[in-house]
Amino acid sequence: MSASLKTELLDLAAEAAERAGRLLRDGRPADLGVAATKSSPIDVVTEMDIAAEKLITDLISEHRPQDAVLGEEGGASAGTSGVRWIIDPLDGTVNYLYGLPNWAVSIAAELDGDLIAAVVAAPMRGETYRAVRGGGAQLCADGAEPRTMRPRPAPPLDQALIGTGFNYVTTVRTGQAAVAQQLIPRVRDIRRSGSAAIDLCDVGGGRLDGFYERGLAPWDLAAGDLIAREAGALTGGRVGRRPDGDLTVAASPGVFAELQPLVDELGAWHD
């Protein structure tokens, strides 16, 4: 894999994320409503999710027409180059719908199944997180020089701040609440931001000590997973597995060693 390809993919992801983020931030209608639902009546899609994904996929197709695309809102296409883009045009749609600031554009590129470049743009924070495989991760804040991302030094688990998320299917979120109830006495506290992509970046940047969630799709976790790992965090799924739809865990190394087996044991991966 050439350095020039990594740079090309990272730059294209950054441009697409910046344009989509600007569209979402500046073009949000005052009367924004729900355009469709997905897994349940409260798992929503807005017209802006759809518009942002179209902007991203059109830009990628213009520059790299032979690449494959997997987008949350149906923008899937086959390719012949070995490169596939994994896109969440608006991670944190319910936050966005309600006018809450914690939402992001998440774009990752993989080559022959291996993640090699990732960008998560959080416009309301004025921040963009980016990484290439083997090249570390950076936080680019508005008006500041990019800085290298690092996790926090690992505290004991009972002093760790842990992020999580809840599914929009009632039976699943009920099980997730039961896990959180058992976990919260064992950690400093639990946070639920509403954006897995941002949570994963916050682990990599030291704003969370760890994160876990069941039910994430590839577009939810691809970019954030690479950014967290390149920053120096560890990521995985159930013990001995990679992050997947059953379970995603990310944490600074010391916290990960305790958090992953604990949430696995507590059943964070099933109802």
Image (cartoon, helix red, strand yellow):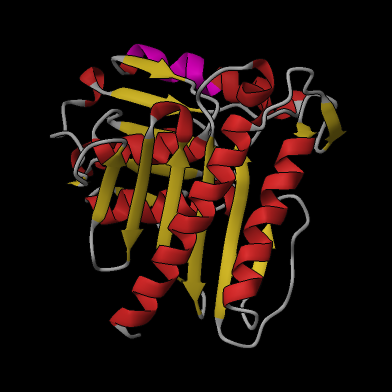
Residue 65 included in the magenta stretch of the image: no
Q: Residue drawn 16% across and 27% down?
A: 155
Vertical comparison of 240 with 19: above or below: below
Q: Residue drawn 40% across and 28% down?
A: 125
Name the outermost residue toward the left: 153
x and y percentages locating residue 25 in the rendered image: 57, 31
Along the horizontal axis of the image, is 60 left or right of 121? right
Q: Quadrant of residue 151?
A: top left
Residue 184 included in the magenta stretch of the image: yes
| Viewer-closest of 51 and 222 | 51
Q: Residue drawn 24% across and 25% down?
A: 157
Along the horizontal axis of the image, is 99 left or right of 48? left
| Viewer-closest of 144 and 133 | 144
Numbered circles on residues, count: 0
Q: Residue drawn 21% across and 38% down?
A: 144
Magenta segment's dominant SS is: helix
Q: Quadrant of residue 259?
A: top left
Q: Which residues are magenta?
A: 179-185
Quadrant in which the C terminus is drawn: top right
